[in-house]
Amino acid sequence: MSGQNELKRATAGIGKLDKLEESRRLVNEAKQDSACPDMLRAYYVAGKLEISAFEIRETKRKINPGDKLADVAEMNRELCDGYDNYLRALQLDTTIDAKGRAKVRYSKEIAKSLNLHHSDYYRYGAEMYNKRKYYPEAYRSFMIYGEMPRQSWATKSVKETRDSLLAKSYYYAGIGAYSAGEMEAAAVALGKAREHGISEERSYIFEIATWKNIMMRDPSKESVAKNAIEASAREAYRRYGTKNPLYISSLISTMVDNGKTVEAREIADREIGLHPDESHLYALRAWINERDYEPDKALADYCKAADLKGANAETLTKAAKKLYERGRELWNRLEGAEVEKRKEIKEKYYLVAKGYAERAKELSPNDSDTELVLMSINYDLAL
């Protein structure tokens, strides 16, 4: 009965900060004792200890914000630990009586307490975030705020919390986790932000970056990551169109990887029809053509992309390489001197490719791929 005795002694700390640490120790011992006869009460007492401590400090803080006992980080931890313990108690708090009826002991009290503090989780999450205590401090509070409205025991007002607020809460949780290098946690939060219709464009950028990071760290998660990237990029593309090339390029690349090449090509074709002067769209379709074993179409699109204003260094280098390689193919097919034909290849392929490569070098002076292409072209031009 040691667990039962510990629980009785632990209740002395409820509402008393001077006995809080000892009560925490006792209740934790009870929770870890497999022989404890009342595990439900152990979690209930653990939750009540933390929430009551938070409420005492909150009162002190309202009276005197500088009160040493009103430590914001400690209050945030108490809110979160209280929630976790109460949630476990709620999961345990169902018994069936002799007549087959479900009965609960603490659920109504717990639900009332947590619902009353719903807004506090956002408030204290924001305080932790502003203090740059991103993870786990801010993350835990923001996630609880977002999750509570879907709980069966949530009140009508909590369940009706606006999606925009829930999305913001998940967004800040995700950014915080990302900043701390906790990619798995960031992915969960940013995915939920998207599901709730987050309006912050950065959320989609970070979600895509998060899953790319996860995929790079753990190749076994490539399939899950690509599906998530496609979902995030699709929504970002729906909202923002092609103004940021990241969205459509991430969407199309993952769609092709996921076997949706036809739909990816349709999107690229449609956007090119709408925006015929956008270099990155032709480069994107060129990449699709490469993956679809259409080298002639790929070359044409890369060159079109390179000829347009706004072509980036990567596109220019790819166009230079593809055009140079095509020229090499034609050169190697020739037999004998064939001076005029070789001159034509140099002018139409090598020199144009060189122009692309030189423009790429201006934009990215230290790129090794560009240097290699340019060196190869210059060598063959000297023949």
Image (tube, rainbow, N blue to C red):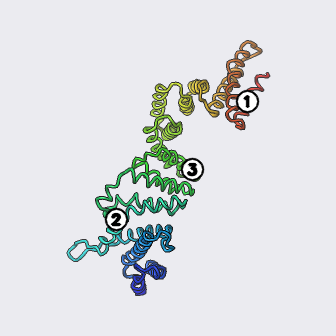
Which of marks 3 and 2 precedes in the sequence? 2
Q: Based on the displayed image, in which of its 4 quarters is residue 336 positioned?
A: top right
Task: Looking at this view, name the residue that lies furthest to the left.
Answer: 99
**Residue 213: mark in rendering:** 3
Left/right of residue 104 with respect to residue 351 in the rendered view = left
What residue type is disc 3 on? Asn
Left/right of residue 313 with respect to residue 45 in the rendered view = right
Q: Residue at x 47, y 34 (%)?
A: 264
Do the CB atoms of the residues marked 1 and 2 lie less than 8 Å apart? no
Query: Residue tagged by mark 2?
Result: 115
Which of marks 2 and 1 precedes in the sequence? 2
Q: Quadrant of the C terminus?
A: top right
Image coords of residue 33 (percent x, y): 45, 80
Q: Residues within 10 Å of mark 1 (few under 14, many from 20)?
A: many
Choose between 136 and 100: the one closer to the eye.
136
Q: Residue at x 72, y 19 (%)?
A: 346
Query: Residue tagged by mark 1?
Result: 374
**How far is mark 2 from mark 3, CA to CA?**
36 Å
Q: Residue at x 37, y 65 (%)?
A: 117
Height in image: 201 above or below 54?
A: above
Height in image: 262 above or below 95?
A: above
Image coords of residue 270 (percent x, y): 45, 28
**How far is mark 1 from mark 2, CA to CA?**
66 Å
**Residue 194: mark in rendering:** none
SS class, disc 3: helix
Q: Residues within 10 Å of mark 2 (few under 14, many from 20)?
A: some
Q: How many numbered marks have been drawn onto this rendered protein structure?
A: 3
Image coords of residue 199 (percent x, y): 43, 45
Task: Looking at this view, name the residue that lies furthest to the right.
Answer: 382
Left/right of residue 122 with respect to residue 222 in the rendered view = left
Q: Residue at x 49, y 49 (%)?
A: 224
**How far is mark 3 from mark 1, CA to CA?**
32 Å
